[in-house]
Amino acid sequence: MTNAEWNTVSFPSLGIELPVYSDAFTIFGFTIKWYALVIILGMFLAAVYCFRRMRSFGIDDDRAVDVVITGFVGALICARLYYVFLEWDSYKNDISKIFSVHSGGLAIYGGLIGAVLFGAIMAKIRKLRFMPLLDLVGMGFLIGQGIGRWGNFFNHECFGSNTTLPWGMTSPKIQAQLKATADGIFASTGVVVDPSVPVHPCFLYESIWCLVGFLLLHLYSKRRKFDGELFFMYIGWYGLGRVFIEGLRTDSLMVGHIRISQLVAGVCVVAAIAVIAFKRYKIKMDGEYVFYKDTEESARLIAETDEKYKADEEKRAAKKKAKAAAKQSSAEELAPEDRLTDEDNDGNEQEEISDGTDN
């Protein structure tokens, strides 16, 4: 089998065949994966969206930078630890494999826990109100996940059990994976898979679910009832989709016969609904709710940042002006000498002419 055939993803019912390679390009001997590029694109677009809307949520974007970076680091660490914990049998005999993140093995729920935990700590340090920031983070997660899932497409992974639906997909890589894991899949889930039959493109289902969720939350964002509501809606929306999509997958993290991500997703749905219902009831009983964006604290912190930027800009302008003045002064100091030299030259020329006339 040629390399092109090995990397061909097909949708037999639709008559579509696509060459899909994991490697994007090689630079200085280092191979860049499409998976990484797609993830970076998702993160970039999520960051652009969130930072453009920071101030409309009353968030000081200068302080938020530190919280976002810390949350990202925490997400990577906890996503890996979560995965390693659930797949401990694969790592217990070689601890060094834990640090081989490039070989794969990150869990979205571990990442979510890490992002919130580390982000909350930094928000406390930077004196930043965390719940309105989480509203934006939730929508950012949906953008990042919706786009990032296409990285799984380039890796020929994140697929489900067999299907006869028109969009069922297959590839030699997928077939090889199913042949190697068919017995384990049946033992843990009771699902029989036929490597020769197309499978559910679970990455596509989750991508669409996340992007639709982002659109809905974006449209609802100006009608939110309290700070943090959008984040809990994200938790509930993503969890609801994951409950069904995870049930189709053949590569789930398992504990016995339980799909861990499916269980956690179900708990998240219930918890999100409970929190939203409780907060709305409390607001109804209290009769009034003040969003952080409408508080004096929010206005003061944003004003302080604006003053800082203004002061920095004035300093830069003053330095630029001083530099220009120094340059002009230097030019003026040299100018008299140049003029004197010119006058001396003119005098010498006149003397030479005079001498010539007398002779």
Image (cartoon, helix red, strand yellow):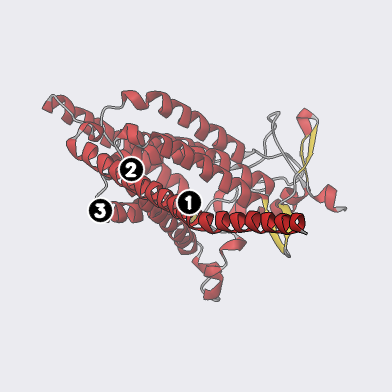
Q: Which numbered mark, 1 or 2, is in the foreground of this view?
A: 1
Residue at left 51%, top 63%?
A: 87
Say which residue label 2 marks: 310
For marks 3 and 2, give the CA distance.
26 Å
Element marked by disc 2 = helix
Q: Quadrant of residue 166?
A: top right
Q: Quadrant of residue 196?
A: top right
Residue at left 56%, top 57%?
A: 340
Say which residue label 3 marks: 124
Q: Amino acid at mark 1?
A: Gln
Residue at left 45%, top 59%?
A: 82
Front residue of 20/246: it is 20
Left or right of 172 on screen, residue 111: left
Say which residue label 1 marks: 328
For marks 1 and 2, give the CA distance.
27 Å
Left or right of 310 on screen, residue 211: right
Q: Quadrant of residue 9?
A: top right
Using the image, determine if residue 51 lies above or below residue 24.
Answer: above
Mark 1 surroundings: few (<14), some (14-19) or many (≥20) residues within 10 A: few
Element marked by disc 3 = helix
Q: Amino acid at mark 3?
A: Lys
Position of residue 251 measured from the top left corner of the image (x, y, whole percent): 59, 51
Position of residue 190 measured from the top left corner of the image (x, y, whole percent): 58, 48
Left or right of 301 on screen, residue 251: right
Q: Earlier in the sequence, mark 3 or mark 2?
A: 3
Q: How many marks?
A: 3
Residue 246 seen:
no
Mark 2 surroundings: few (<14), some (14-19) or many (≥20) residues within 10 A: few
Using the image, determine if residue 259 lies above or below residue 96.
Answer: above
For marks 1 and 3, give the CA distance.
50 Å
Q: Earlier in the sequence, mark 1 or mark 2?
A: 2
